[in-house]
Amino acid sequence: MTTRIETRFAALKAEGRAGLVTFTMTGDPDYDTSLAIAKALPKAGADVIELGMPFTDPMADGPAIQAAGLRALNAGQTLAKTLKLVSEFRKDDNDTPIVLMGYYNPIYIYGVDRFLVDAKTAGVDGLIVVDLPPEEDEELCLPALRAGLNFIRLATPTTDDKRLPAVLNNTSGFVYYVSITGITGSAAPDANKVGDAVGRIKRHTQLPVAVGFGVRTAASAAAIAGHADAVVVGSALIDVLRASLDGHGKGGPQTVKAVADLVAELAQGVRAGRSVAAE
């Protein structure tokens, strides 16, 4: 069965452009605001939505996303509420792919079998679980694939040709290339190096390659879009969200607008980047 992720990337390929993948944290700064943001993202230009599952020890994330997770946890966000949010989103949008991104611990505690049933029922399309290497595929990857969910793996600048086949094995939906060594939001990617890396990955797989970590502006998104099938933006969206909060750390309509406005800018950059590359 074809997933929404596969359908969306096929449509992007037919349009001859790269996609925009947005990352926000569910429950940040509160459940209702994060749901309103999720609902606003497709209209603003997001092609695929990544939703963070808040966790107390997010080792791959920089300060911005760590703080977003803590805001969400302090506001009472749980994995069950994250799945509820996806269900609420699906009432109005049955087309936009949703990927849950995070760490294995909350899923393990929830119960893998129960989680996969509930995620599929809610309308989740794929998972990115950054602390489960290929050697642990029996834990979650293979059960997720059997449940009809894409399991998306990360490749990095240090993933050499010897390691890459293991990373790509059982990966589906798309490959997420981490454009820098380090944590999220910590540096800007070099578009030429990204182009070389994407070319190398594509010699090993037919899957689309999405590039993330460090993309903050429309110009940077355009540069990456010239080389990749999709551009992933997270920390920059978290930063504008945080800046929109009032003195008590509360969000509101201004928070949704701030995130949606930046997504619209980034979407324009992504579209411009692919059209320039195609000329």
Image (tube, grey):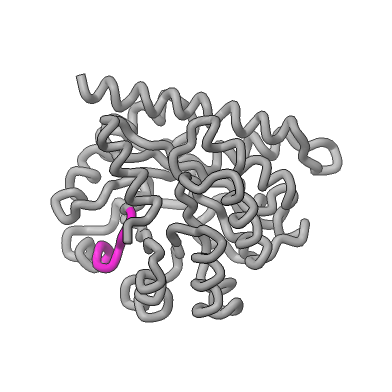
Q: Give the left or right position of residue 71, taking residue 227 as reference.
A: right
Q: Is residue 187 something that shows in the picture?
A: no
For the point 39% across and 29% down, the residue is: 270
Q: Exactly how many numbered labels are in the figure? A: 0
Q: Nearer the viewer, residue 185 or 174?
A: 174
Indicate whether 209 appears above or below 15.
below
List the single residue furthest toward the left. Answer: 203
Indicate whether 107 appears above or below 274.
below
Image quadrant containing the C terminus: top left
- Residue 226 image-quadrant placement: top left
Q: Magenta stretch containing residue 237, yes or no? A: no
For the point 23% across and 45% down, the residue is: 197
Q: Give the left or right position of residue 57, taking residue 196 as reference.
A: right
Which residues make up the magenta segment? 167-173
Q: Give the left or right position of residue 201, taking residue 258 as reference.
A: left
List the single residue furthest toward the right. Answer: 248
Main SS, magenta region, reads loop
- Residue 260 image-quadrant placement: top right
Indicate whether 66 appears above or below 270.
below
For the point 56% across and 80% down, the residue is: 111
Q: Give the left or right position of residue 59, taking residue 253 as reference.
A: left
Coordinates of residue 82 in the picture (x, y in percent): 63, 60
For the point 56% across and 61% down, the residue is: 122
Coordinates of residue 278 in the picture (x, y in percent): 21, 24
Coordinates of residue 105 in the picture (x, y in percent): 56, 74
Coordinates of residue 106 in the picture (x, y in percent): 59, 72
Q: Is residue 48 something that shows in the picture?
A: yes
Image quadrant containing the N terminus: bottom left
